[in-house]
Image: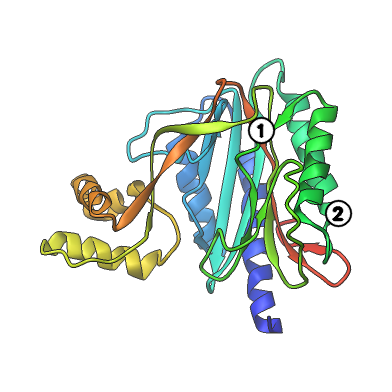
Amino acid sequence: MDEQELENWRKAGQIAKEVSDYAKTLIQEGMSLLKIADLIELKISELGGKPAFPVNLSINEIAAHYSPFSNDPSITEGLIKIDLGVEYNGCLSDTAFTVDLTAEKEYSELIKATELALEEALKKIKPGVSVSDIGKAIEEKIKEYGFRPVKNLSGHEMKKWNLHAGLTIPNYNSKVSSKLREGMILAIEPFATSGKGMVKDGMPSGIYRMISKKAVNNEDTKKIIDHIEKNYSTLPFTSRWLVDIFGDNVVSHLNMLERLGMIHQFAQLREISDQPVAQAEHTIFITSDGCEILTN
């Protein structure tokens, strides 16, 4: 990676950090999720980036992949995870934090366990360390607080225009021997829960990704495909963005594209015992002797 590309990765991380700090001042109980998503995504644009994926605002037992739909009436409550990403010249960042909106702050220890697990993982990062060693550090810290890591959610390597590229970083001791290498860009993201520590597919999310291209005859559908390719490329997008441009009827076109296998819709991810989940995440660059945290 040359210095200019690294600067682009750093810029994506810096924007995400600024937006994350802004979002932390924004979140209050009873707020519209739609308003929060719009404000966060607007802030990304104002700072010179683009959303790398629709902002996720997942509440309580929903661990990931909840982004508000167009006209979504949902409001903040309980335990909310704010997961946001930035694209800058094809380079990406991914960061997340969790807020306890309960009056009694009943989830403070769960959040603390998750944040400290992330800290422990970052201390371990350097070339030659196995991914299972990172997962072990995360698992041990979460269990120290009496919780469980979510085993089927993980961190991930990132490359230009590709959020999930190559290496997977487990949140438990997976016994996998794959090793970290200098120059990698990784998202480290512990998830902790008071439940059983697994997620299952829930409701459709309205979050999609283009996976193949086929010929279609409908002119309106062609315009939607062209817009997706031009503006999102291989990155996830939400029906909400397209409704704002093409109107409510765009959903029927997306349904058709999904049936044709041209786009994939992600499911909301729900903890299998319906217990709350907390998340913390940073994007890092692996250096010769450790790591540079790009989103901090």
Looking at this view, is 178 or 243 the one in front?
A: 178
What residue sits 82% from the left and 50% below the top? 133
Q: Which mark is residue 124?
A: 2
From this viewpoint, is residue 48 visible?
no
Residue 80 position, x and y percent, is: 59, 32
Quarter of the image with the C terminus in it: bottom right
Determine the secondary structure under disc 1. strand
From this viewpoint, is residue 57 visible?
yes
Q: CA distance from mark 2 to mark 1?
A: 21 Å
Residue 14 position, x and y percent, is: 68, 62
Amino acid type of disc 1? Answer: Ala
In the image, taking residue 162 as reference, residue 110 lies left or right, namely right
Looking at this view, is 280 or 82 the one in front?
A: 280
In the image, taking residue 284 as reference, residue 276 lies left or right, namely left
Residue 172 position, x and y percent, is: 74, 41
Residue 124 position, x and y percent, is: 86, 54
Colour scheme in use: rainbow
Compared with 29, 240 (above or below) is below
Kindly check if marks 2 and 1 are in contact, taking CB atoms under 8 A apart as contact: no
What residue sits 71% from the left and 23% below the top? 107
> Circle 1 is placed at which residue position?
278
Determine the secondary structure under disc 2. helix
Amino acid type of disc 2? Answer: Lys
The tag earlier along the polypeptide, 2 or 1, is: 2
